Image (cartoon, rainbow, N blue to C red):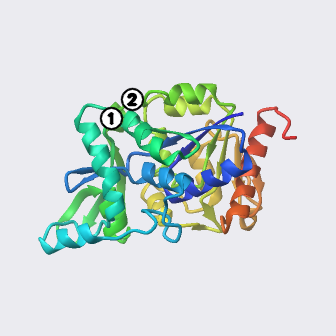
């Protein structure tokens, strides 16, 4: 069984861990969001790729869902002592090593997909992790700043420093229109038995991946099952509601499915709190969706796989 999943950060990574447990024999390819990538201290940081790599490779800080386990912040403290920022983005000492290796390889001429493969040689995540593109794409957010007026800022500043407190007027994946899918992305989708959309942010994670030319069409040609990141009208984690509001989409399981559309989605898993949801052209199933522990997460992934096999005409037995 060949599965492709489009993944953002914490929610996507945890779902993938459940997917590995639910389908241990499957060949899983993960197409990772790179719109959150940012350059800090002269280093290229890829938060979503690293969260997937660390989570599946056993190096994640389980409590916070991002960054390394057993982390220290001596370098960050020393940088602050020199007055060098930004202070709002917390890179740990262990994490710095990953970004140094990545930046050195990029400077030497390696593409991000090759760099990611090299980094995964250490972590052995058990999936093939491919960035959505080797080209630079950065998600920017247009806000009305009380001090500086309307301006565009990097998504990470809006998300991490401002905690999405300033309403977003628009969210733009800068460079996406001209980017090309990374090597292996379209081939993996075309050869997949089905595609899964984990409960990642539908705007700045999954949405950014789908914005890369050619990716949405390739995905739409397959059987696609998504897992709702919205339960009972609220995000399971993070501030996806602020992102949905920015693009004029209601924060509900139904509205997110409609946003993806029946041309893309074949099946949609919603929580029991949203059991009455119905969307024309999309098969909706309800079940508990809180990834409260390993067993619950495995069961969610198993339900997604089962629905995908059902909709693709394959027996789920």
Image quarter where the N terminus lies is top right
Q: Quadrant of residue 189?
A: top right
Taking the image as shown, residue 113 lies to the left or right of residue 256, namely: left
Tell me if residue 169 comes above or below residue 73 in the rendering: above
Q: Can residue 27 be seen in this view?
A: yes
Taking the image as shown, residue 114 lies to the left or right of residue 81, namely: right
Viewer-nearest residue: 171 or 214: 214
x%, y% of residue 110?
31, 32
Tell me if residue 258 comes above or below residue 130 in the rendering: below
- Identify which residue is drawn at 77% across, 44% down: 307
Q: Which mark is residue 135?
A: 1
x%, y% of residue 179?
35, 32
Q: Work out how far the residue at label 1 is from the one at label 2, CA to CA, in angstroms.
A: 7 Å
Q: Which mark is residue 174?
A: none
Asked which secondary structure carries label 2, the reply is loop
Taking the image as shown, residue 125 lies to the left or right of residue 27, namely: left
- Identify which residue is drawn at 81% across, 39% down: 310
Viewer-nearest residue: 228 or 121: 121
Q: Quadrant of residue 97?
A: bottom left
Tell me if residue 206 comes above or below residue 286 in the rendering: above
x%, y% of residue 138?
32, 47
Q: Which residue lies furthest to the front in this view?
A: 122
Q: Are marks 1 and 2 in contact (CB under 8 Å)?
A: yes
The residue wearing badge 2 is 180
Taking the image as shown, residue 12 lies to the left or right of residue 231, namely: left
């Amino acid at each position: 069984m060949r599965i492709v999943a489009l993944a953002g950060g914490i929610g996507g990574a945890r779902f993938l861990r459940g997917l590995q447990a639910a389908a241990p024999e499957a060949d899983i390819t993960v197409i990772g969001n790179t719109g959150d990538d940012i350059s800090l201290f002269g280093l290229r940081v890829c938060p979503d790729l690293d969260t997937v790599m660390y989570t599946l490779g056993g190096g994640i800080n389980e409590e916070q869902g991002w960054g390394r386990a057993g982390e220290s912040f001596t370098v960050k403290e020393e940088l602050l002592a020199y007055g060098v920022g930004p202070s709002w983005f917390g890179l740990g000492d262990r994490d710095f090593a990953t970004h140094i290796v990545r930046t050195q390889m990029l400077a030497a001429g390696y593409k991000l997909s090759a760099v990611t493969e090299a980094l995964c040689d250490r972590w052995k995540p058990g999936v093939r992790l491919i960035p959505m593109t080797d080209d630079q794409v950065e998600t920017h957010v247009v806000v009305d700043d009380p001090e500086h007026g309307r301006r565009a800022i990097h998504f990470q500043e809006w998300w991490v420093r401002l905690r999405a407190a300033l309403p977003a007027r628009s969210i733009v994946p800068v460079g996406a229109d001209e980017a090309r899918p990374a090597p292996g992305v379209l081939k993996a989708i075309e050869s997949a038995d089905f595609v899964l959309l984990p409960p990642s942010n539908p705007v700045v994670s999954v949405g950014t991946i789908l914005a890369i030319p050619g990716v949405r069409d390739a995905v739409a040609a397959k059987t696609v099952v998504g897992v709702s990141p919205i339960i009972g009208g609220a995000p399971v984690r993070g501030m996806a509601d602020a992102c949905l509001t920015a693009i004029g989409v209601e924060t509900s399981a139904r509205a997110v499915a409609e946003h993806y559309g029946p041309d893309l989605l074949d099946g949609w898993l919603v929580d029991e709190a949203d059991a009455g949801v119905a969307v024309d052209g999309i098969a909706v199933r309800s079940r508990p969706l809180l990834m409260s522990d390993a067993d619950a997460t495995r069961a969610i992934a198993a339900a997604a796989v089962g629905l995908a096999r059902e909709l693709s005409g394959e027996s789920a037995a």
